[in-house]
Image: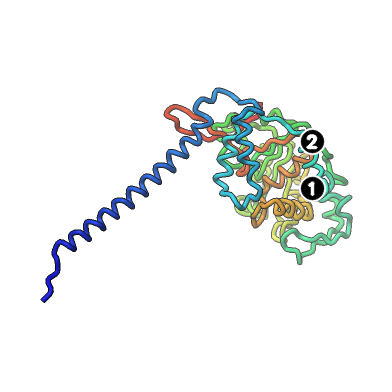
């Protein structure tokens, strides 16, 4: 008869316990390294930061190199790229005139906002069979009534404005105190009816030249303007004489509700102009950013306006947009508070 060694199970159990402890310790150390690395990454650039660094300083050169080494956006995590952008905000900004002009030239060939940002009587003549951006099988026949709604030509031309601001409607501008800088811009685009009441003016300003309206907002908040129209009219009055811009020809569902906006403003004798995105411009902008690695079912209103601003303005600033870099402000206790950058 064979007898089992009773100490064998104890040794095996001890080995398993040690192995388990080792794995847990390794995981804990790895986690701590990730946490400490993240904090050190921020501290590395901001712990002794007392003001903007020179554009060609060693630190700024390193930061720009970290961003420029990314050749394909899909090959890097969005959060990682965003961190690099945030770090870069400590550097003074300098405009590369030749690169900017080359970029604008590229946009002119592919998109041409000064000619095709809006539907006009010039680029969309009477009788045009206008194709929708998404519902490509759908056709909208431009009749006399709709044709009269279009401006004769684009109201803006290439590099008309020296400094523009494209302002999103997200909450990341809270506590940024960017209002004065936004108001100082020569032309301000705002996305999707953002709040600009007195409560928010310190952060977002009040100046508005063009404000976009997503038809879904009209559908959900104002019942497609089929009954009470005055509440919608009052919302638009906050932006004073700003022009209203809508994607009427994005898909077939957007058209009727977008056209009603024009009727509402006419009924109340508002001086505000109503414009509609040209669907072909939206298609061209989407294709352009897709060619650069932007993967999205549909690019955001903010990116569309930013693209247009790059052609219509000598300098463009993006604030409150998801793709706009934020800066990290290290306060008491090294607690990071997030703020969108403002230009000086």
Give the quarter of the figure containing the N terminus. bottom left
- Of 5 and 118, nearer the camera is 5
**Picture coordinates of residue 280 (x, y %)?**
79, 55
Q: Quadrant of residue 127?
A: bottom right
Q: Quadrant of residue 250?
A: bottom right
**Picture coordinates of residue 48 (x, y %)?**
51, 25
Q: Residue tagged by mark 2?
A: 98
Q: Is residue 227 visible?
A: no
Q: Which type of secondary structure does the marked residue at label 2 adopt?
A: helix
Give the quarter of the figure containing the C terminus. top right
**Picture coordinates of residue 32 (x, y %)?**
39, 42
Q: CA distance from mark 2 to mark 1?
A: 24 Å
Residue sitting at x 67%, y 52%: 293
- Of 190 and 63, nearer the camera is 63
Q: Residue tagged by mark 1?
A: 117
* Left or right of 126 on screen, residue 166: left
């Amino acid at each position: 008869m064979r007898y089992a060694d009773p100490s064998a199970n104890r040794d095996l159990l001890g080995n398993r316990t040690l192995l388990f402890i080792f794995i847990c310790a390794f995981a804990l150390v790895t986690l701590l390294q990730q946490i400490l690395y993240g904090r050190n990454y921020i501290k590395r650039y901001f712990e002794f930061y007392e003001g903007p660094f020179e554009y060609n300083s060693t630190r700024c050169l390193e930061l720009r190199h970290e961003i420029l080494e990314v050749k394909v956006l899909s090959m890097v995590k969005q959060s990682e790229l965003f961190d690099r952008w945030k770090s870069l905000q400590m550097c003074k900004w300098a405009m590369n005139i030749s690169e900017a002009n080359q970029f604008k030239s590229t946009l002119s060939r592919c998109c041409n906002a000064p000619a095709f940002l809006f539907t006009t009587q010039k680029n969309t003549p009477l009788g045009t069979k206008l194709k929708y951006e998404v519902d490509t099988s759908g056709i909208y026949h431009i009749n006399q009534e709709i044709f009269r709604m279009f401006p004769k030509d684009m109201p803006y031309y290439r590099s008309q404005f020296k400094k523009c601001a494209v302002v999103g409607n997200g909450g990341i501008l809270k506590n940024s105190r960017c209002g004065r800088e936004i108001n100082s811009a020569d032309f301000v685009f705002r996305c999707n009816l953002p709040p600009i009441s007195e409560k928010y003016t310190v952060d977002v300003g009040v100046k508005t030249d063009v404000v976009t309206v997503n038809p879904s907002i009209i559908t959900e908040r104002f019942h497609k303007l089929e009954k009470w129209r005055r509440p919608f009219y009052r919302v638009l009055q906050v932006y004073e004489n700003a022009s209203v811009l809508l994607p009427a020809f994005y898909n077939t569902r957007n058209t009727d509700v977008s056209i009603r906006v024009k009727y509402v403003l006419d009924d109340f004798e508002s001086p505000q102009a109503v414009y509609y995105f040209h669907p072909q411009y939206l298609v061209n902008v989407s294709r352009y950013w897709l060619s650069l690695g932007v993967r999205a079912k549909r690019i955001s209103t903010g990116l569309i306006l930013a693209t247009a601003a790059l052609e219509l303005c000598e300098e463009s600033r993006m604030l409150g947009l998801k793709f706009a870099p934020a800066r990290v402000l290290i306060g008491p206790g090294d607690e990071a508070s997030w703020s969108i950058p403002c230009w000086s």
